[in-house]
Image (cartoon, grey):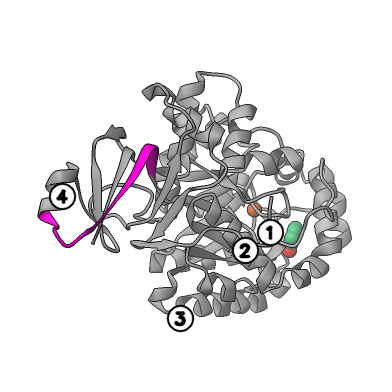
């Protein structure tokens, strides 16, 4: 048993002072430090000192590790140009993303306090790394394919990847999960089968959804930038689904929809009503010319996430939170900062059916210890946490402190 005594504790009810946390692989008790010391006399006690703030480990629920080798090969600014560049460069990038490259991407996440991530896996080449890293990984096996002639083979390959993720040892902390690529790129037959599998087995479920203006134009009018794309690559001139038909698959099963930038008020009302979540990727959305997700719509819980190196320049979650803070310039700053912290803890955890993301009795003992540079008002704690954190000072996963420092030869 360990007892951590920080100056401030972040709980689902807000910031608390003068409390300690006792844990083994789960949080066993929260209370007065002296009382806990008496109750658990054998426990190791760690006082973390002035201006230390203990957070639950952060969750980055949408990342593409398989594209971790990209820095400047892909074309930014316009979604269709970006997609074209992904198709051209995909083989090179996926080849370059060897285990060392993907492991370093996971270490980068760990340094920013990410103890759990959602890996959207197109090919399964990232599973070996995910099994070895200390973090909890929700392994989103992705299905893609709109051509009905190829669905059976694609679905079998998808099932095989799900099986591989399912057969990992519990000590590897892999949760198998299902990802539908997008409404325009997956045939409804395959969507139906993959969603049914998630529902039957209670697996976390995710889908890219209404990311770019082109996507809406294609699904609603069979026109716009996707028209030439589908004619060229898939020899078809009509979409496989409508927005309404796509969403209906997920009714009654809370799902994580990535981006949702181009959703209408009415569509977000439906997401809220069905208990869905939005993975909000502010930097990716900006770089791919997709627009701004209206985070001020409080009805839908959001998880702020980095997306992958295919549309970002770092996997540091605090870089992402700072981008969100700058992008959503309307509304009260402190309230936004608090919502953003919740979006990488409790709400992110709920979006992947995880019981982490909270410092409460019985929750997993995953922590990120941060330190503020100066004292600040209580109401500014979330804001200054976002502004001033580059890396966590210490990280625990399942009760064990994990090494987060860079290898000697590396620097920023
Ligand atoms: C498809 O298989 O239809 C597809 C795959 C990736 C992007 C767009 C479409
Ligand atoms: Fe994505």
Report the residue at 60% width, 65% height from top: 142
According to the picture, the residue beneath numbered tag 4 turns out to be: 36
In the rendered structure, does residue 347 fall within the stretch colored magenta? no
Does 328 sit left or right of 224 as displayed? left
Closer to the eye: label 2 or 3: 2
Secondary structure type for disc 2: loop
Q: Residue 245, percent across and down?
A: 57, 50
Q: Which residues are magenta?
A: 39-54
Q: Residue 333, percent across and down?
A: 51, 21
Q: Quadrant of the N terminus?
A: bottom left
Report the residue at 58% width, 61% height from top: 106
| Label 1 vs 4, first from the N-terminus | 4
Residue 235 visible from this viewpoint: no
According to the picture, the residue beneath numbered tag 3 turns out to be: 167
Asked if the residue at tag 1 contacts the one at tag 2, i.e. Cβ–Cβ closer than 8 Å, the answer is: yes
- How far apart marks 4 and 2 lie (CA) works out to 36 Å
| Label 4 vs 2, first from the N-terminus | 4
- How far apart marks 2 and 1 lie (CA) works out to 6 Å
According to the picture, the residue beneath numbered tag 2 turns out to be: 407
According to the picture, the residue beneath numbered tag 1 turns out to be: 410
Find out if the beta carbon at label 4 lies less than 8 Å from the nearest ligand 2 atom: no
- How far apart marks 3 and 4 lie (CA) works out to 39 Å
């Amino acid at each position: 048993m360990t007892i951590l005594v920080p100056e401030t504790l972040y709980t689902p009810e807000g910031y608390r002072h003068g409390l300690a946390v006792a844990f083994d692989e789960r949080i066993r008790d929260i209370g007065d430090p002296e009382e806990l010391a008496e109750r658990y006399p054998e426990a190791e006690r760690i006082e973390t000192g002035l201006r230390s703030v203990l957070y639950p480990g952060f969750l980055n629920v949408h990342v593409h590790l398989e594209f971790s080798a990209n820095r400047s090969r892909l074309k930014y600014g316009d979604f269709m140009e970006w997609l074209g560049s992904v198709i051209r460069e995909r083989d090179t990038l996926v080849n370059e993303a060897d285990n060392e490259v993907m492991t370093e991407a996971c270490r980068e996440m760990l340094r920013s306090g990410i103890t759990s991530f959602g890996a959207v896996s197109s090919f399964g080449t990232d599973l070996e790394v995910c099994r070895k890293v200390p973090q909890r990984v929700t392994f989103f096996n992705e299905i893609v394919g709109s051509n009905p002639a190829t669905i059976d083979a694609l679905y079998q390959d998808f099932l095989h990847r799900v099986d591989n993720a399912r057969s990992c040892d519990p000590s590897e902390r892999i949760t198998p999960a299902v990802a539908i690529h997008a409404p325009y790129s997956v045939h409804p037959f395959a969507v139906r089968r993959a969603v049914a599998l998630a529902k039957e087995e209670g697996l976390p479920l995710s889908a890219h959804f209404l990311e770019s203006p082109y996507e809406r134009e294609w699904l609603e009018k069979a026109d716009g930038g996707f028209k030439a794309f589908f004619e060229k690559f898939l020899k078809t001139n009509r979409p496989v689904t409508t927005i309404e038909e796509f969403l209906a698959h997920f009714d009654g099963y809370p799902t994580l929809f990535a981006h949702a930038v181009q959703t209408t008020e009415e569509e977000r009302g439906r997401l809220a009503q069905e208990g869905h979540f939005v993975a909000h990727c502010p930097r990716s959305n900006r770089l791919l010319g997709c627009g701004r997700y209206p985070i001020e719509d409080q009805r839908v819980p959001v998880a702020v996430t980095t997306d992958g190196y295919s549309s970002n320049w770092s996997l540091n979650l605090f870089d992402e939170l700072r981008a969100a803070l700058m992008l959503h310039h309307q509304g009260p700053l402190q309230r936004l900062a608090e919502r953003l912290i919740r979006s990488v803890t409790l709400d992110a955890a709920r979006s992947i059916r995880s019981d982490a993301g909270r410092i409460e009795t019985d929750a997993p003992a995953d922590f990120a210890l941060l330190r503020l540079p100066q004292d600040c008002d209580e109401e500014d704690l979330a804001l200054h946490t976002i502004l001033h954190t580059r890396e966590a000072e210490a990280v625990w996963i399942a009760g064990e402190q994990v090494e987060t420092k860079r290898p000697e030869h590396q620097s920023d």
